Every structure is written in structure tokens, then in C-alpha cells.
Amino acid sequence: MIRSGTIMAATFVLAAAATLAPRAGYAETYAYVGNADSNDISVFKFDAASGEMTLVQTAAFVGVEKPGASTPLAVSPDKRVLIAGVRSQPFQAESFAIDAKTGQLTHLGNGPLADSMANIAFDRTGKVLFSASYGGNKVAANPVQANGVVAAPSQVIPTGLNAHAVLPSPDNRFVFATNLGSDQVLGFAFDAATGTLTAKDALTVKTPEKSGPRHFIFHPNGKFIYLLHELNADLAVYAYDADKGTWTEQQRVTTLPPGFTGKPWAADLHATPDGTFLYTSERGSNTLAAFKIEAASGRVSLIGSVPTETQPRGFAIDPTGRYLAAVGEVSNGMTVYKIDPASGALEKVKSYAVGKKPNWVEFVSLP
């Protein structure tokens, strides 16, 4: 005979298991926030059904004493490793293993970076880490070892003024890097077999004087590139020739909210995974701007702007394309917004405290 207490205990266990189990239709998703002054990463479990976050870990950097200017993050293509760029001396890349079940981070080791790097990015194989130095006017390539820790730089290449962002093309054949102070984007051929970059002058893209090209992204279909300019807050749309690696400008619009008369200070941009909507952050007005992407041409039209965290240097869109999380360097907070699937408009869900001087967000969905 089964006692009632046994039945109650079993019922409790089953209920708890149901609570902890992934919701049907959603992978387990985590958000990682790089905090420059805290020298750590806030790890949140993300509920893709409600948009709510739960802090599950604060992963401290190892062997770092002084805060850096920012904390760029990069996730390996296989989602097993997260690397943080340390911008205080000694300049290094901190590698963490991502636990496939819990999303939590375990420190793997540190490797040397060539300078204080404003931006880091894996190549599409996960075997090379690219980086760009704003103050050092250079880009570099570091081999990523089998254990996920970067080796010494295999290449350090001088650039124009203020290299800011670096990113490989979707097919991994080219790498591009912005030069904010020289108003240009540099292009390199990339040999993934050898991990070698070769500068190609024919791929250089010139931007308007004192526009300050900062961050850029590829449209999910690989046919368009979107480039955000820090100094005038313009968003430029380019057609991308994947065979030649060339950019052709199609459109240029402002990301500033109507009536803003302060100094532009644009920061970040991201598109939804389906390529329908694009968002930008602007630190002078502390706003997020939303745009609708026209599928055939890649051109954008403004949806509107919303106020957000103070000094919104970084944000990210979750893998479902239904939510956006923005952090404020001055507010030390993160706000999650729901993305309206029809209009692209942003609706605030909830705000959370994070570490000191947050500037980067990465979402990762784990099986």
C-alpha cells in the first residue's frame, strides 16, 4: 500500500521537475553581460516565454586587478567558449567554458592580446580570434587553442586611426575593420586554413568626414551590411557583394530622436534573426531607435525611438527575435524589451541590476 505522504512527496518532486524543465518550444537561453569596472560577467537565465531574467552567476575575471575601458565579449560558433577582452594591463583574453546544462561559466585560462582591444570576434570556424584596438590603431589575429584559450597573436596589423570593430564575412573569406578616426572601413582577405589576414586596398570603404564609423553587422541573408557612425549617429545601408567582398552604399539615415540637439554619440546596432527589424543605441539621447528592413532592397524605415538605460553602449537581441536587452554604462542596469512581431516597436518588460559599467550583452541558446 502506498502512503499518502509518499504520494504527496512524489507529487512535489514531479511539480518541481516540471518547473525546472525547459518550456516546450524553447531552448534554454542565457544572457551574458560584460561589466568593465567590476571585472566580471553577469550570467542570467532568460525565460524566452516571458522575457524575464534570473541572475544565476557572477563570473569574476582571474588575474585582473584594474578595470578597463570596456569589456567586449565573443562566443565561439559551437557555443562552448566565451571570451572576454581585458582592456587594462596586461592586455589579455579571458576564456570561459559555457556549461551546456546550466549556462554558467568556468574559467579556462588567459591569453595575451596585442593591445587594449575595443572589439573581439571569432572567425566562423572558432579557431581564430580577431581584435581591434582603438587607442593602438591596429587589428590582430590570435589562434584559439583546442582548450579554448588564445595563443599569442599570429598577426598584428597597423590601421588608420581608432580601429573599433572587426568582423568576418558570413562565408569567412573576408574580414572588415572600422577606423573611426580615419572615416573608413578596411577590408582583408582571410585564409581560414592558415589563419592569415591579407590587406586589400580595393576593399576600403570611405565614409563621410568626421562621421566616425563604429559598429557594423551583416544582414542574416548576407546581402546587406549596416554601419553605424558614432560621431554623427548615421546608419548607412550597403549592398554586399559576397564574391568580391565589396560594399555599395544604398541609403543613409539618422538614428537620433526627433528634436535632439545634443552631441551625437551612437554606439551599437543589431538586427532580429529573421532580418525584419534593426535597432540602434545612442548615448547622447539615451535612446534605442527601431527600424523596419525592406526585404528586397535592405533599406530601412524608422519605426520610432524609446528612452533606455543611461549611456546605452551595448545591447543584444535574443535568438527568438522576440526580446531585446540593453545595458547602461552609467546606470549599471539592464532593461529587457519585448519586440512587437508585427510593428517592431519596443515595449519595456523589466529592469535588472548588473555589475559596474556594463557595456556588452551576448545571448546564447543551449540545447
Image (cartoon, rainbow, N blue to C red):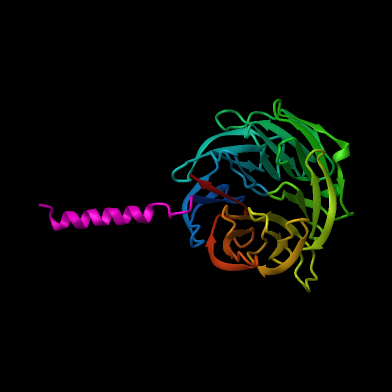
Q: Is residue 245 above or below residue 291?
A: above
* Vertical relation: 19 (above or below) 170: below
Front residue of 251 and 16: 251
Quarter assignment of residue 111: top right
Q: In this view, does 91 lie above or below 289?
A: above
Q: Which of 73 and 235 is in front in this view?
A: 235
**Image coordinates for residue 291, horizontal then vertical, percent:** 71, 63
Q: Nearer the viewer, residue 244 or 136?
A: 244
Instruction: Place residue 233 in its image quadrant.
Output: bottom right
Residue at the farthest top position: 194
Q: Is 26 included in the stretch rendered in magenta?
A: yes
Q: Find residue 79 and report its horizontal and vertical position in percent.
A: 55, 41
Work out which residue is located at the far bottom of the displayed protein and give it.
259
What range of the chain is rendered magenta? 1-27
Q: Which residue: 59% across, 57% down?
A: 321
Q: In this view, does 70 lie above or below 99?
A: below
Prevailing secondary structure class for the magenta stretch in the rendered image? helix
The front one of 236 and 308 is: 236
| Residue 148 location (% of width, % of height) | 57, 33
In the image, farthest residue toward the left: 1
Numbered marks: total: 0
Residue 16 in the magenta stretch? The answer is yes
User: Does residue 243 appear left or right of residue 201 in this picture?
Assistant: left
| Spot occupied by residue 337 in the image (x, y as percentages of width and height) | 58, 64
